Image (tube, rainbow, N blue to C red):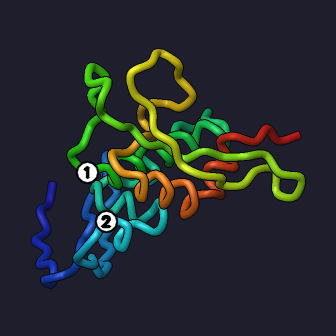
């Protein structure tokens, strides 16, 4: 195997090799600052996490399975180090809430939090420590949520 040394300019990110041995070099400005400024697309989440999009899919995945995998990765990147503590009933765990509408099928409606009860209305992988992150996740990635939540004919 041949080794290639790559010098990445300061302020840039580079993806060099995925698990399948493909070499991909993609220099992209990596903005500094708040995570919502850096992650606007699924591809941004991949760059932030160092994961190649094609490495999370399986050839037999359906469109809703692909959407769920995308949302899990995006949520993980937006949350950073925070993980919900399901033993702490006082910790708020925020998640986006969608409402069915006559026009587009459903729209982002609000964000809610849950703690201290056993009722589950959201997957634990898609919750956040702050309301603003849950709302951003619901609004910014509405098309991916729609792909996950809508059954196609």
Which residue is drawn at the image coordinates 29% and 61% (left, top)? 48
Residue position marked by numbered label 1 in the rendering: 80
Helix, strand or loop under label 1: loop
**Camera-side residue of 112 and 58:** 112
Quadrant housing residue 141: bottom right
Residue 35 - label: 2
24 versus 113 height, above or below = below
Picture quarter with the N terminus: bottom left
Q: Is residue 79 left or right of residue 106?
A: left
Residue 151 position within the rendered picture, expressed as x and y whole percent measured from the top left: 79, 38
**Camera-side residue of 125 and 13:** 125
Give the Cα distance between marks 2 and 1: 9 Å
Q: Is residue 28 left or right of residue 73?
A: left
Helix, strand or loop under label 2: helix
Mark 2 or mark 1, earlier in chain: 2
140 versus 77 height, above or below = below
């Amino acid at each position: 195997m041949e080794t290639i040394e790559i010098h990445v300019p300061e302020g840039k990110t580079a993806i060099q090799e995925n698990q399948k041995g493909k070499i991909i070099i993609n220099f992209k400005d990596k903005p500094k600052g708040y995570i919502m400024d850096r992650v606007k697309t699924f591809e941004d989440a991949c760059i932030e996490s160092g994961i190649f999009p094609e490495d999370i899919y399986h050839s037999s995945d359906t469109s809703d399975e692909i959407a769920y995998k995308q949302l899990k990765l995006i949520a993980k990147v937006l949350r950073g180090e925070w993980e919900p503590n399901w033993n702490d009933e006082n910790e708020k765990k925020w998640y986006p809430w969608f409402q069915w509408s006559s026009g587009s099928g459903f729209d982002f409606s609000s964000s809610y939090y849950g703690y201290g009860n056993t009722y589950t209305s959201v997957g634990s992988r898609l919750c956040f420590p702050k309301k603003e992150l849950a709302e951003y996740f619901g609004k910014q990635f509405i098309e991916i949520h729609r792909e996950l939540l809508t059954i196609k004919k």
